[in-house]
Amino acid sequence: MTEPHSPDGERRDRTPIVLGIIAGILAVVVGVTLTIALTRGGPSQGAPSPSTPAQTTAPEQDPAPSAEPTDPAEEPAGVQLAATGFALVDDSGAETFGYGWSDPSAPAVAALTEAFGAAPEQRTEKGDGTHYPDYTVYQWRGFALYDMVPIDGGTPREEYTQPSWARVTANTVGEVAVTGEFGIEIGTTVDAVRAAGPDAEVDRNGVTRYVFAADRSSMAGGVPSYSMMADTDGTAVTAILYYFYAEF
């Protein structure tokens, strides 16, 4: 005969199986959880906090301050002639370049070229081969600078009474005024010239040259000093010269 089963006995037989299944499921869950925890990295060190958005572009910077603009150099407004040389001056009358008659001519030619806005024509004026040397002439329209060429065996430049000199035939060269002394300029009438009190009148082939400050033509301490002369056509002044005057 087969022994009958009781309800309590059947429940006791199934309990270990159920518990084993639950334990297995829990083990799997725990294992998966540990695996995820171990494989996840820590919080990113470079990640921005939620309250501060990440900056993707460099912040705008104020432009560097630019240098203050500088005023252009004052352009020469005039050439003023005097006994011992000439000067370039600005609008205020301040000297920007000075030249003495015995100075090297190259800086003067460069300064006049810049002032007049054009390079000069150049030629040679022949002397007499003895006491009067050849001169290199730097000629602008209205202004000429004569610079001596030393004679072999002759008086050296630094001792010569007239190493350079100037001749003016216009009151302006370009936009630059050229000014002499005694109130005389190109176009001044002969009557006005005489009224200015020249020291001498010299006939030159039927026209008169008027000499001012005749007594200041000299050579002292290596510094030449000239008189001012006004050539005329019988009616008005046509040229002004700064030249060494000597009576013969």
Image: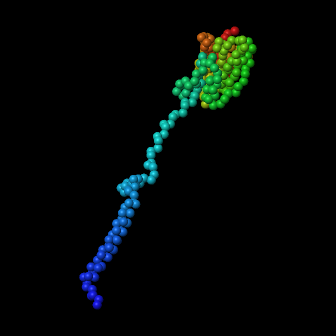
* Residue appearing at x 61%, y 26% in the figure: 111
Q: Does 128 sit left or right of 194 as displayed?
A: right
Residue 191 in view of the camera: no
Residue 34 in view of the camera: yes
Q: Does 140 sit left or right of 40 as displayed?
A: right
- The residue most toward the top is 248
Along the viewing direction, whichever of 37 and 114 lies nearer the viewer: 37
* Residue appearing at x 52%, y 27% in the figure: 92
Along the viewing direction, whichever of 105 and 161 lies nearer the viewer: 105
Q: Does 114 sit left or right of 121 as displayed?
A: left
* Residue appearing at x 66%, y 11% in the figure: 246
Way the structure is coloured: rainbow
Along the viewing direction, whichever of 170 and 34 lies nearer the viewer: 34
Image location of residue 100, percent across then percent down = 60, 18
The C terminus lies in which quarter of the figure? Answer: top right
Q: Does 207 sit left or right of 29 as displayed?
A: right
The N terminus lies in which quarter of the figure? Answer: bottom left
Image location of residue 79, percent across then percent down = 59, 24
**Quarter of the rendering containing residue 168:** top right
Image location of residue 240, percent across then percent down = 65, 20
* Residue appearing at x 62%, y 24% in the figure: 107
**Quarter of the rendering containing residue 122:** top right
Image location of residue 159, percent across then percent down = 65, 12
Along the viewing direction, whichever of 33 and 143 lies nearer the viewer: 33
**Quarter of the rendering containing residue 144:** top right
Total number of numbered labels?
Answer: 0
- The residue most toward the bottom is 1
